[in-house]
Amino acid sequence: MTRTSTTAKHGITPFWNRIPRFFLYPFGLAPLLYMGVLSAISLVVLLPIVGPLVQLLIWATFLRYTFVVLEHTSYGHLEPPSSLGRLSSAENNRPYKQLVVFILMGVSVFLVGMAFGGTAALIAGLLLGLALPACIMLLAINDGFFQALNPLSIIYLISKIGLPYLALCFFLLSLSGGSGWFAEFLAPRISKWALFPALNFIAMYFTLIMYNMMGYVLYQNHQSIGLDVQVDFADSPDALHKHGAGHDPLTAELNRLLADGHTDEAVALLAQKIRIDWENNDLHDRYHKLLVLAGRKEVTSHGREYISKLVRDKKLARALDIYQDCLKADREFMPQEAAQVYPLACAARDMKQHKLALSIMRKFDKNFPRSPDIPSVYLLSAKLMYEEFRDEKMARAILHHIQKKYPQHPLSGEAEHYLAFIDKLAPSA
């Protein structure tokens, strides 16, 4: 998680207090355009044979976007993503994984009914229905199909959210019913050629609201869940609306200095505050932002110190933000300590920022020639090159290098297993 102290200080707005904003979310330019184009394509559904296939592809494509929205929101981004971004093959498969979850739940209810009767089936359906939102949220943040079906993972997530989880289920059920009611109301009042696009648009609208709501619930509870976020609530539009700058004397003083053109004095004031209260991440963030906006050279020196603190505090998502800002100021920027590189690279990989992960690890063996993390960095680099950038030649070269230079290291065996994995997937000559 990112900047826990400020998140706790300001308090994230409960999702039930943001209901109107969830209904407005799909009217952002990107989601509105996305829903409109896909709904227009559904005119093809009227064609024989290909129609059902097109409808399936439309919804598989749209559900990919809803999972992007769910994950994007869970990281603290309250505005819609501008695009789908770069999705891995695993992320592309999320809609199909969700479909399998639905099928397995339906089969489970059917089998319970066959074995124990209708009442037992009703109870099983109710329990599985309550578990379904948790399954979808686990699928979005972990990409793990079996974890999404793991009762322990589901119970853990629900317990961390607490009683508000029941409120979430109520709202999701209401939204699902609202979509059906609206479709029934509209169907007899619209011409046949426009029916499928209109019904698809309505269903997409309500579905996007539901996934946005689930993502926000994860964000609201990210501290208890242990989920890293990219945007602290203190920086979100909600917090800016909730807390005016006039209530903070330091902010008022900084605004006065900057308005008068006294940037050096503002920088010095924050530097002094940090020396007094080093553990205050809010001060570090303000100082960092001011250095970036003012184009000050101190951004890299402070960045190294702050990244060290954030890695120590296990706030890796925020550390990556600082790293990227420092990289813009100095293309050769590197973390202060070798021990910070591998955790940062792993965090970047987990957040699907694969180029950033490679950037963090570049020249690691030259910059830190005695680091015990070199084999780990090599292995992670090889996996990224093969899995994300399809550079099999480079991946093999790195793996062979691990075996040659570190034959006694435990990761030498893992490198051998990964080479065998690549060989198995390689096309036969």
Image (cartoon, rainbow, N blue to C red):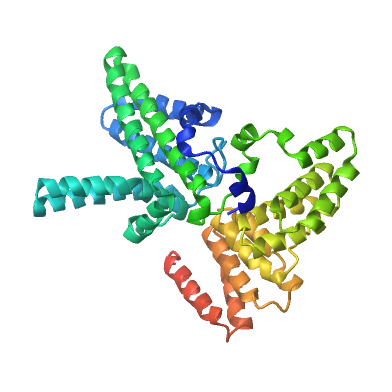
Residue furthest bottom as drawn? 408
**For the point 35% across and 31% down, which residue is it?**
175
Does the rendering let one see residue 201?
A: yes
Q: Quadrant of residue 255?
A: top right
77 relative to 112, above or below: above
Would you say 124 lies left or right of 400 here?
Answer: left
Does the rendering let one see residue 330?
A: no
Viewport quadrant of the N terminus:
bottom right
The picture places residue 185, in percent across and down from the top left corner, at 29, 18
**For the point 51% across and 80% down, which residue is it?**
413
**Number of numbered discs on residues:** 0
The picture places residue 181, in percent across and down from the top left corner, at 29, 24
Front-lying residue, 55 or 210: 210
The picture places residue 39, in percent across and down from the top left corner, at 40, 26
Front-lying residue, 406 or 80: 80
**For the point 34% across and 47% down, which residue is it?**
98
Front-lying residue, 272 or 408: 272
271 relative to 23, above or below: below
